[in-house]
Image (cartoon, helix red, strand yellow):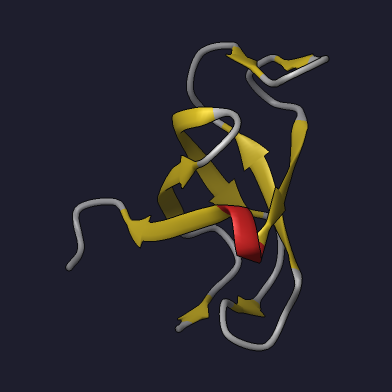
Amino acid sequence: MKIKKGTILEIYHSRKGKFTGEALEDFETGADNFYPIVLVSETVSGMATYWEKGEKILCKGSLCTIKIKGGK
């Protein structure tokens, strides 16, 4: 799936849980290993770290599912 810069996304991450993010640049979910996403929801806790709203959050394609917010 092609994602355009600025698209609001729902991310379901196996280690970080569910959160909302925004694409920092264009990317393709099937081709890219890591997704450039900035957090737009509340604080997210990972296994050893946490991210706050506005921070870039590391999303590896093999660990998460992405859905366009408000989309299909």
Quadrant housing the N terminus: bottom left
Question: Quarter-wise, where is residue 54 in the image?
Answer: top right
Q: Is residue 37 left or right of residue 16?
A: right
Query: In this orientation, which residue lies closer to the viewer: 16 or 51?
Result: 16
Give the residue furthest to the right: 48
- The residue under the point 43% across, 50% down is 8
- Foreground residue among 27 and 32: 32
Percent coordinates x, y for residue 29 in the rendering: 57, 77
Above or below: residue 49 compared with residue 59: above
Q: Residue at x 63, y 19 (%)?
A: 53
Q: Quadrant of residue 62?
A: bottom right
Q: Total of numbered circles in the picture?
A: 0
Residue visible at 29% across and 51% down in the picture: 69
Q: In the image, residue 40 lies at what x, y percent?
A: 53, 29
Q: Quadrant of the C terminus?
A: bottom left
24 sits left or right of 18 in the view? right
Residue ID at (71%, 67%):
25
Residue 28 percent coordinates (x, y): 60, 82
